[in-house]
Image (spheres, rainbow, N blue to C red):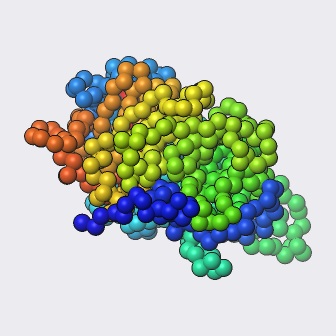
Amino acid sequence: MHQPPPASSCSSSGSCECARVGVRLSALAPAAAPCPAPRRLPRPRQLEPPSRGTSTLIRAGLGPWCSPTGSPAPLSCETGCGEGSWILVCRLLVPTQVSLLSMEEDIDTRKINNSFLRDHSYATEADIISTVEFNHTGELLATGDKGGRVVIFQREQESKNQVHRRGEYNVYSTFQSHEPEFDYLKSLEIEEKINKIRWLPQQNAAYFLLSTNDKTVKLWKVSERDKRPEGYNLKDEEGRLRDPATITTLRVPVLRPMDLMVEATPRRVFANAHTYHINSISVNSDYETYMSADDLRINLWNFEITNQSFNIVDIKPANMEELTEVITAAEFHPHHCNTFVYSSSKGTIRLCDMRASALCDRHTKFFEEPEDPSNRSFFSEIISSISDVKFSHSGRYIMTRDYLTVKVWDLNMENRPIETYQVHDYLRSKLCSLYENDCIFDKFECVWNGSDSVIMTGSYNNFFRMFDRNTKRDVTLEASRENSKPRAILKPRKVCVGGKRRKDEISVDSLDFSKKILHTAWHPSENIIAVAATNNLYIFQDKVN
């Protein structure tokens, strides 16, 4: 087996390899001059109308979530689930290009061709889910994939006859958000993959969301239309212009009922502001601005202005050989519009206050945990790179995810985290193999539940982990088609590190590293979670007795 180079291969001058900053520096675009604040940008070009598609719902099995001891895990939430059981509500399949073509022939798009999709065992690279996000009410759930598509699911309304269907989600809208592009000046391909989706609070009957790929952020409006105007004076019933000489009377147009249609239209396009790949977008609590972060810079945007942004963080050195860290994630405070936080590949978190200066290069608070010299290794800086950072709903805590752990930080204590949870510490002995197959660079996300009492994050072999902050109990569950049989119990999984393996345990050598849970989401007020596994979206909810 090829052994990685020793840690001393990084020079003291700052020139380093990917292990030095925890990311691939070759992925960074060619260096560009620092952008002033504010900077004027060229206006975006006109977009083509979005294509519409559809998906379908596949029912899966039911079963309680249990703790490692065998009893139901008490996962607290503001809805008060207590000791209740949990059920797998449904497994949703993101539509493939083939299934979209077959679905266009049917009128009832919510009930068609279930058998085709159920037997559709393969998934292309474009079908892999790359982000999952609930809206602020939890009624809508949006997913983005590597093919640049956004699929929105709507929660089923509760009926007197079918109370159990309340937790199910059906397809609401599907549209193409981004297309592949090519930067001819830099000879760089721009993928259509959706990196992040963020919802805006609903202000009227329409919904608004932000979606971004590596370079461009778009604001989408999703609205319903169930009436169409008729009786134009200058147009006939087929929409063709009439000869004005033939018009002898004036008519008042009227609205006629029609089949419900969900439309997705791009309202704003925020482009040409990032030299490097965008990894985060976050909506401010004033709901007038948002920020977008790439590897070296963070920009502040106003929703009404597309040709101008303010550069609020710039860590690009004058000499790129002196680069030692990159920005990995960023998020606004949920209540204070002047405060935001961003993480780096060195495992540090910086809290910034925009009231202090226009350019927030000087942080207000700096969160870092001292490293134990006895645990120092070649992989230390890679596995300490933070892949996700999230404020709690209360705004008091920050949660970060690195390769092996989830940490909770108190805003009032910078020297160390108040809580540390081991996600898959059994992989520490496999770091060399994970480095060889590039899995060590995987970016796992983490989420809070509605009351900030439970933490969820993903792992390999389609495992995902839950940690109860109050009871200090944790559980490992698996999202897979094999465990989706009707009425089957979703049993906790255990990984055997060494020694004799029990019947219900899985060996660490048997883990499938190609199956990974990178993206998860938790309903803002109820115990409903969404877990993305390749092109499948699993939805679990607290069991209703």
As drawn, 143 above or below 235:
above
Picture coordinates of residue 458 (x, y %)? 38, 44
As drawn, 467 above or below 180:
above
Query: Residue shown at 79%/38% (left/top)?
Result: 355
Q: Can I make out residue 289 in this image?
A: yes
Q: Can I make out residue 458 in this image?
A: no
Picture coordinates of residue 253 (x, y %)? 79, 55
Camera-side residue of 507 and 78: 507
Picture coordinates of residue 376 (x, y %)? 38, 46
Residue 267 placement: quadrant:
bottom right
In the image, 249: left or right of 100? right
State the quadrant of the N terminus: bottom left
* Number of on-image labels: 0
In the image, 253: left or right of 417? right
Residue 463 placement: quadrant:
top left
Camera-side residue of 407 and 195: 407
Query: Residue shown at 51%/25% (left/top)?
Result: 451
Picture coordinates of residue 6 (x, y %)? 37, 60
Query: Residue shown at 46%/35% (left/top)?
Result: 407
State the quadrant of the C terminus: top left
Query: Residue shown at 60%/29% (left/top)?
Result: 411
